[in-house]
Structure formats: structure tokens, C-alpha cells
Image (cartoon, rainbow, N blue to C red):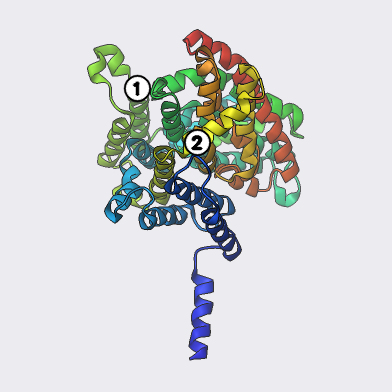
Amino acid sequence: MDERIKSLLVHIYEAVPFRIVPAIITTIVLFTLLALPVPEGLTSNGWAMLAIFLTTIVAIILKVMPIGVMALMAMVIVSLSQVTSDTSKGAVADALGSLSNPLIWLIVVAILISLGLKKTGLGRRLGMMFIAALGKRTIGIGYGLAFCELLLAPVTPSNTARGGGIIHPIMKSIANAFDSDPAKSTEKKVGTYLALVNYHANPITSAMFLTATAPNPLVQNFVATATNGAVHLTWTSWAVAMLVPGVCALFLMPLVIYLISPPDIKKTPDAVTFARGELQQMGPLAPKEIIMLLTFVMLLLLWANVPAMIFGPAFTLDPTAVAMIGLFTMLITGTITWQDALGEKSAWDTLIWFGALVMMAEQLNKLGVIAWFSDGMKVAIASSGMGWEMIAAVLVLVFTLTHYIFASTTAHISAMMLAFLTVGVALIPGEYQGYFILMMVAASGIMMTLTHYATGTSPIIFGSGYVSMGRWWGVGLVMCLVELLVFAVIGGLWWKVLGYW
């Protein structure tokens, strides 16, 4: 019997999907929070919901389990604790309520659409076309990678899939063509520079489109909530607002990295030959690539509401409806198969974890927790006597730089953004609120520049060995501050022209 028990314990230890020490820490955090007295101004249910939320964030930061499992854990706890409802049925309905949110399905469907870019080879072809056009110098290759990022961003809501799955293999192929290989200690020839550009294009493009990274719909929702619906960023208005500062930041980024982390090889005429050879080997556009390209164009036109501009508002389509049209088109044309869609684990994983985080954020708002936290922060900042400019700067910088303690943009945005937006809206004069809000929107993407664990793309590129940790963090901080400055100055002027402030 003792041997069976021992065998069972060994099996459990080896089979459980969580890391033991982080799991113990997370459990201690939950029970400690629940044992503390309920703060003044909060209900017991509100405090319990906050404890569940904070514990989930800690679990995500410590990577206790896969994020989907942790999200399911949060849903189970909300359902069993009944902090959102007096009945079990009501609590379960609340726990699962966000799974019907169209914004979540927009991201899920768009991830499935991005499969087509990879499966058809169109993403790689586009990358090689840019290299063939701009690759005579290493900095030109950098611009080619950046422009390819920009082109793919509107229809690739997984920034990890875009930067790590599509662009990074192209970057590695080019680096290897110049014998720039970390295994040979020759990564500085061109690889270090290209890897940094490969990565730093990702946060900029993620900030430029609603559909460029998974947490952006959450940002959109928080902006609408904080302003009571006064500011609602549609796909088009988001893209227009971020276009000018985003393009300027994207043009500046390869040059800044070239100055602070220059490649050993400056001229690369062989890159053009390499890219042209790859394109020749790929041959002319295949029928599946043509269908993917036409679907790509259709999605951009519909997301930009071009039919409504031509024929009137009756032809306005919800972005999620547009995404579903695109996915259906790809399925019925055989560009991707239903088995491809079912096998795209990241999409269904996103549905669960994103749904759980949105649910908890909504419940915190309903139970008065966000208002309570915002009021406390508002009193502290108001008593400092700062002007609105300094208030906006402090809120944006604190929000951005606290990403050093987060390993997930979604966790960071879920934990902090609504509260910071609410405080800013309360303390900044109405005529300047649009400027502050758009800076916060930009910062939600720019903060990904900071660390090698900042988002899903970073460990992929960092793990390839081209960039040391010290260089990654140093370049990351410089680029973060440069990009915030670009959005604050150029973006501020552009937003003034658009009438946001």
C-alpha cells in the first residue's frame, strides 16, 4: 500500500501542469488577501473579487500554469465563491458571460485568419519582396523587416505570430546567409541588429491597429468605460489616430538602433541576391496566395468602413462581422481548412484566458473596486498640486515602466489600465483628455519594448541568441523613451489636427 501511495504521489508530482513553488506562493497570496480586513469603501464581495483578480495576475506573472488553465481556475473560483451573484447559476453565468463578447471573438477569428498568411507563404513572400527592394545595406534590411511588420499588422492580431512566427524566420534566414550565427559567436555581423529591429517593430505596429495584438480590444473597452462612452475608438479611428506617430516611430526605430547597436557589416548586396533567389524559387503567386491577398485587401477595406463611406451608414459593418466574413471566405475557398482552424490552439487558448480577464475586469467595475481604487489614486495625485501636464506624464510613465514586473501585456492592461484612465479622466481638464487617453493607448503597445519577457514575441527572438540580456534591456529602455517622445510630440500635433484635444 505504501508503495502505491508513493507511486501515486510521484505521478502527481510529475504530471501536474503547475510549478510547485510559484503555485504555493500564489495560494498564500490568495488566502492572505482574503484574511485581511475589508478596506473602507469596499464591499466584502468587491474585496473578494479583487483578491481573486490579483491572485490570477500573480499566477500569470509567476507562470504557475499555462495561461488558459489559470484563466479557467479564475472562472471556477468566481463560480464557486458566488462573489458576483447570490446563486450558483448566476455566478456561473457571470463567470462565462464574457465568452460572448464580440471583441474577444474578433481576436479569435483574426488569429485564425492569420493562419492563411503562414500556410500560403504570402507572409514570407512579402518579407522577401521588401528585402529584395531595400536590402543593399543592413539598415535597408531592417527597414524591410519593419515595413513587412506594418503590412501584416492589421490582419495579424497575434503579435507573437507576426513578429516571432512570420518575420523572425525571415530575419534568421538573412542572418545565416551572412554567416551571422550565435553558435559561431558571429551574431554581431548583422544578426544582433536585425533581431533588435525584428523585435522593436513589433510593439510599434501593435499600437497602430485595433487588430494588431490581442489586448487591444481590452484597451478599447477600458477607454469607453473610463469616458462613459464619450470616446469610443473604432477600428478606423484607432488606425487614423496612430498612423502618423506610428509610421514616424517605425521610420526612426531602425536608425536609432543602428546608432546604439550598429552591425559589423554595413553593406549587404548579397541580401538582395538571397531574397531574389528565394522569390524565384517560390515562383509566381500561387492561386492560394492570390485568394489570401484578395481576402487581405477585402478585410482592410471593410475594417476601414469604405462601403459605408461610399454607400452610406447602412453599410457599416461591425469589425467582428468583417473578421467572420474573412474567415468564412478562407474556409470555403480552401485557403485554410476547418482542421487548420481547430488545430490553431492559440486562438482557442485566447478565447478562454482573454474571456476570463475581461470578465474579472467587468466584475471589478460592477462591484465598485475600480471606482474605489481610482478615487484613492485621484486624492493622492490631486493633493500633490501637479498641473495636468505633469499628471498625464506621471500616469503614462508609471503605467509604462511598471511593465518591468509583468510577463504579459494582457495581465498588465487588465490590472492597471482602467484605473489609470479613470484617474486621468477625473483630474485632467476635459479639453486635454483626448491627448492623455491616446498616449495611454500608445503606451499599452510601447511598453513591450522593455524586457526579454515583455510579450510572447520577446522570448522567441531573445531565445535565438542574437542579443544579450544587457543589450536587450538597454536598447529596450532607450527605444521605449524615444517612442513615447515621438507619440507625445508628433502624435500630440496629429491628434490636435484630428480634434482630439
Q: Compared to 160, does 17 lie above or below?
A: below
Q: Compared to 6, does 384 lie above or below?
A: above
Image location of residue 396, percent across then percent down: 60, 27
Residue at image position (33%, 29%) is: 319
Side (left or right) of 175 relative to 58:
right
Side (left or right) of 481 relative to 94:
right
Quarter of the figure with residue 335: top left
Residue at image position (71%, 48%) is: 182
Badge 1 or badge 2: first in the primary sequence = 1
- CA distance for labels 1 and 2: 42 Å
Dot 2 falls on a residue whose secondary structure is helix
51 or 168: nearer the eye?
51
Report the residue marked by disc 1.
301
Report the amino acid beneath label 2.
Trp
Side (left or right) of 248 relative to 297:
right
Q: Compared to 220, does 495 lie above or below?
A: above
Residue at image position (72%, 28%) is: 258
Residue at image position (36%, 34%) is: 292
Whether residue 139 appears in this view of the structure is no
Image location of residue 337, percent across then percent down: 31, 47
Q: Which residue occupies the extreme left position in the image?
A: 314
Q: Which residue occupies the extreme bottom position in the image?
A: 1
Number of marks in picture: 2
Report the residue marked by disc 2.
372
396 or 213: nearer the eye?
396
Dot 1 falls on a residue whose secondary structure is helix
Quarter of the figure with residue 234: top left
Q: Nearer the viewer, mark 1 or mark 2?
A: 2
Whether residue 107 appears in this view of the structure is yes
Image location of residue 60, percent across then percent down: 53, 51
Report the amino acid beneath label 1.
Leu
